[in-house]
Amino acid sequence: MANTSRPARLITHPTHSYHALVLTAAGDNTFLCDGCRCHGSGLCYRCARCDFNLHEHCATCPPTLPSFAHPQHALTLEPFPDGGGSSRDAAPRDCDLCRGPIKGMSYRCRPCGFHLHPTCALLPPAAAGSAFHPEHVLALVPAAPRPCSACGKECVVWRYRCDPCRIDLHPGCLHAAKSAVVVARPTRRTAMRFGIELGRRFRIGATLTVDRPKVN
């Protein structure tokens, strides 16, 4: 029986109708997704002629999507045009999961004013096999002000949590190698400063590896 889950090698996409996009392995390099405007790694759909890239998920994400982070309504995929658009849609907005700025397409609930990066919508509500904490399954929960157990910076939005072990991880730190991490527990004043910085700057750049951890 054929493996129907294998991604297509060539696709067309309305955001780049000029040429077909080829499934490409970025290897150790990162790329800027021209759909959601977030950085990514691993597989992407690419037009080498135009240097146009899409996360595999952004290239194939459905027009509507349910989300555990907003169970009240389904979310709708919407574009965010460069340079604005209508006055209603041109206002800057942040992702309600990672608090990073939304610069491209996003999933949105209009009645509630709720937005997610497509890559954040991909995050699983529970994750096993974390390189940092492989002993237990971690749950994605809203963040209380706590430092990340991997990088030491404040978790000011959603985080992966192991309650029995009191482990908190940013989604981007889920697969950080424990041996390579030096945990610096910040003071209350430093934690507040980290919280402000992360609220403005934290991005989910490498989240595609969260949903698809490599298996040796």
Image: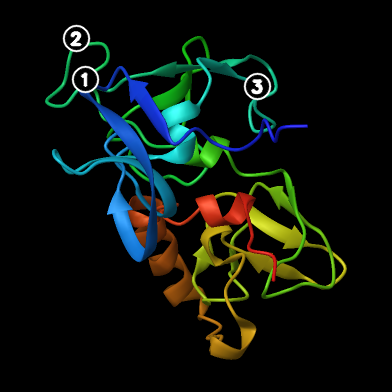
Residue closest to the eye, 109 or 125: 125
Q: Which residue is mark 3?
A: 66
Question: For residue 86, which numbered disc appears in the image?
Answer: 2
Q: Position of residue 204 (x, y in %)?
A: 45, 52
Q: Position of residue 202 (x, y in %)?
A: 40, 56
Residue drawn at the location 40% of the way across and 53% of the way down: 203
Q: Earlier in the sequence, mark 3 or mark 1?
A: 3
Residue closest to the eye, 123 or 182: 123
Please report contact status of discs 1 and 2: CB closer than 8 Å, yes or no. yes
Q: Position of residue 33 (x, y in %)?
A: 31, 42
Type of amino acid at the residue the image marks with label 2: Ser
Q: Is residue 55 above or below residue 140?
A: above
Residue drawn at the location 26% of the way across and 37% of the way down: 34
> Label 2: few (<14), some or many (≥20) within 10 Å?
few
Colouring scheme, one of rainbow, by chain, secondary structure, one colour: rainbow
In front of the other: label 3 or label 1?
A: 3
Q: Earlier in the sequence, mark 2 or mark 3?
A: 3
Q: Secondary structure at mark 2?
A: loop
Residue drawn at the location 34% of the way across and 46% of the way down: 38
Q: Which residue is mark 1?
A: 90
Type of amino acid at the residue the image marks with label 3: Pro
Q: Position of residue 65 (x, y in %)?
A: 60, 20
| Residue 143 appears in the picture as rendered | no
Q: Secondary structure at mark 1?
A: loop
**46 on left or right of 160:** left
Type of amino acid at the residue the image marks with label 1: Ala
Q: Secondary structure at mark 3?
A: loop
| Residue 146 appears in the picture as rendered | yes
> Label 3: few (<14), some or many (≥20) within 10 Å?
some
